[in-house]
Image (cartoon, rainbow, N blue to C red):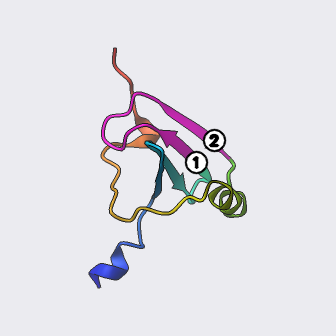
């Protein structure tokens, strides 16, 4: 059961070259950030459906990281100076 549950997550997280790609298929949004704990930036792309994201994954050879967990609410994150 525990093995199956890791595939049921709101976000799909991918990591390449110290950048994290976080895909939310519920709202077709792809975020890119430098940290899953305390980001210094978040870049979001909207209307990225599953087909477009598949193309992005192939082009950049992204592999999903099931062991990574997002430590903040990426949809409602405020930066502090």
Cα separation between marks 2 and 1: 5 Å
Task: Kindly identify the residue that appears in the image at 46 percent across and 41 percent down.
Answer: 75
- In the rendered image, the vertical position of residue 75 relative to residue 3, given as above or below: above
- What element does badge 2 sit on? strand
Numbered circle sitting on residue 55: none
Locate the N terminus by quadrant.
bottom left
Q: Is residue 50 left or right of residue 21?
A: right
Q: Is residue 44 left or right of residue 77?
A: right
Q: Is residue 63 left or right of residue 35?
A: right
**Quarter occupied by residue 57:** bottom right
Residue 31: say if magenta. Answer: yes
> What residue sits right under mark 2 in the picture?
45
Evaluate if marks 2 and 1 touch, with contact meaning CB atoms under 8 Å apart.
Answer: yes
Locate the C terminus by quadrant.
top left
Residue 7: % across, % down: 42, 73
Residue 54: % across, % down: 67, 63
Numbered circle sitting on residue 30: 1
- What element does badge 1 sit on? strand
Q: Nearer the viewer, residue 23 or 76?
A: 23
Task: Kindly identify the residue that appears in the image at 53 percent across and 54 percent down.
Answer: 23
Q: Which residues are magenta?
A: 30-46
Q: Nearer the viewer, residue 81 or 20?
A: 20
């Amino acid at each position: 059961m525990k093995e199956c549950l890791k595939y049921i997550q709101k976000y799909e997280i991918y990591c390449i070259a110290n950048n994290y790609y976080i895909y939310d298929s519920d709202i077709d949004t792809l975020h890119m950030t430098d940290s899953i704990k305390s980001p210094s930036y978040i870049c979001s792309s909207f209307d990225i459906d599953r087909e477009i994201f598949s193309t992005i994954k192939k082009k950049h050879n992204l592999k999903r990281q099931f062991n990574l967990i997002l430590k903040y609410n990426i949809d409602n994150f405020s930066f502090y100076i």
